[in-house]
Image (cartoon, rainbow, N blue to C red):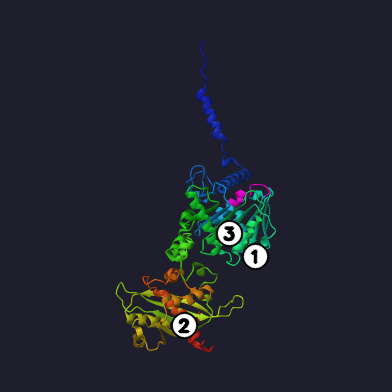
Amino acid sequence: MTRRRKPVARSSGWARRRGVEALTNPAVMSLRQLQAEVAALARADDESRRRWACGRPDCDGLPHPGWLHNHARASQHVPAWAWTVWMLLTGRGWGKTRTAAEAVREWAKTPGLQIAVIAKNATLVRDICFDSPKSGLLAIIPPEDIAKYNSSLGETTIRLRNGTVIRGFGAETPDNLRGWAFDKVWCDEYAAWSRNTAQEVYDMAWFCLREADSPQMLISTTPKPLPHVKRLVERGRRQEQKHREGGDQPRVVLTRGHMSENDANLSSAAREELEEEYAGTRQGRQELSGELLEDVEGALWKGWMFEVEGFRLHAENLPELDRLVVSIDPATKSHENADQTAFTVAGRGIPNVSTYGDSRPHAYLLHAEQGRHTPTASMRRAAELYHQHKADCVVIEANNGGDYLPALLMEVDSTVNWRIVHATRGKRARSAPVAQVYEQARAHHVGPVRLFAELEEQQTTFVGLGETEDSPDLLDSSVWAVWDLLLDPSMPPPRKADDQRLSGRR
């Protein structure tokens, strides 16, 4: 009897064929079926994009098996232990807004929570924290989870279908938070909040967390050397130190980061422009590197003085200047190890918008430079700046045998008006009143950040208590300018309104 062989090969071949035939063939699909297939693929891709944190402890956020899209870097993962404050102290473009919004999204999965989102004002909390098309809450929370969204300036609120409510607040008035009870809080750009109310808003937010089972506050900010920021950072540093010594994990967690960590999601052209304009400057260290710039003990100028709103101006926003001077801190020698000659161009004017009725004049620094020049070359440069900026006067410090400089200036250009000044006090005593002008927010730097980078470095590091300290030439020339404009009782009176030399000053 002949036994029949099992058609194994044929059977497996038919199975493969049926599998292939089961695949969707666009050529035989109706338009409705094709649209449904495309919609299903789009939904699958959207769900994939919405995933945020993978399980890799050292992930760089770039696509890898199982994760087809850019996602969270390891530094953007929520700390795995029980923390109370997570502070993202990072440079611009690092991804802190997206990181914070993703953390809020994760919180919101718990039904019935009350979550507060606080930004500098009501407009910013709505436009950045809620409505931002790439990193706002509406962009990352699945639409099907949202029951209602109210986007009015008086109330920005997301109500989820699970009963959780995410409510936006401006940080202008601490009492806006009075009476509320929250489970979690996100504070956006904490360093940009008003110095007068920021600490009180922070404190009020914690009172609002008093009944939470697991109270947590996430703070996303580019760091600035302001008291309310430094106070919290110092707490985190102390706790980090105790942890390194064998203590518990810090409750105040500090995450630091540079803009370059997020290169994959940034414009290369914008990155190059920012690096060229700000790299190496004080503002670049803060805005790009996320560095909290520490004040030098004993320095007259503090970092916060350069962060006051309105401190940096564009030339088109200048008020009318009733006096403008070029001040010189001259070097008596020009060899390669000699001090440098420094020039400052500054004007005096009443701000277009006064604060609390303050009508005192302000000082506006328009230019600062230094270099090694012979005495003749330095006077020639002073004359160039005088004519370029339509100045009233060249102010010349004439110590160390420099009394001959006015005569040299007249020989170079006899049309230049000049005024000679002599230092009768030490540099610190002479600089202190000018630092007070900055403290009163009555001094402004006008123009590109890099133009004043060297001056600001000298200002924030000058102590003036030791003979071995380097001579801050730019600082000296700026001090003479502000003294002439605001502090010297013998300064000339403002020009008359019909003086035509005021034209072209803006």
- Callout 1 amino acid: Thr
The reply, left or right, for residue 120 in relation to residue 448 is right
The dot on residue 173 is 1
Kindly identify which residue carries mark 3: 188
> Looking at the image, do the residues carrying marks 3 and 2 touch, with CB atoms under 8 Å apart?
no
- Callout 3 amino acid: Asp
Q: Earlier in the sequence, mark 2 or mark 1?
A: 1
Q: Which residues are magenta?
A: 103-112
Q: Residue at x 64, y 50 (%)?
A: 143
Q: Earlier in the sequence, mark 3 or mark 1?
A: 1
Question: Considering only vertical position in the picture, is 213 above or below 469?
Answer: above
Secondary element type, mark 1: loop
Task: Tell me residue 217's x, y (percent).
Answer: 59, 54
Q: Determine the CA span between mark 3 and mark 2.
A: 42 Å
Kindly identify which residue carries mark 2: 484
Question: Considering only vertical position in the picture, is 456 above or below 249?
Answer: below
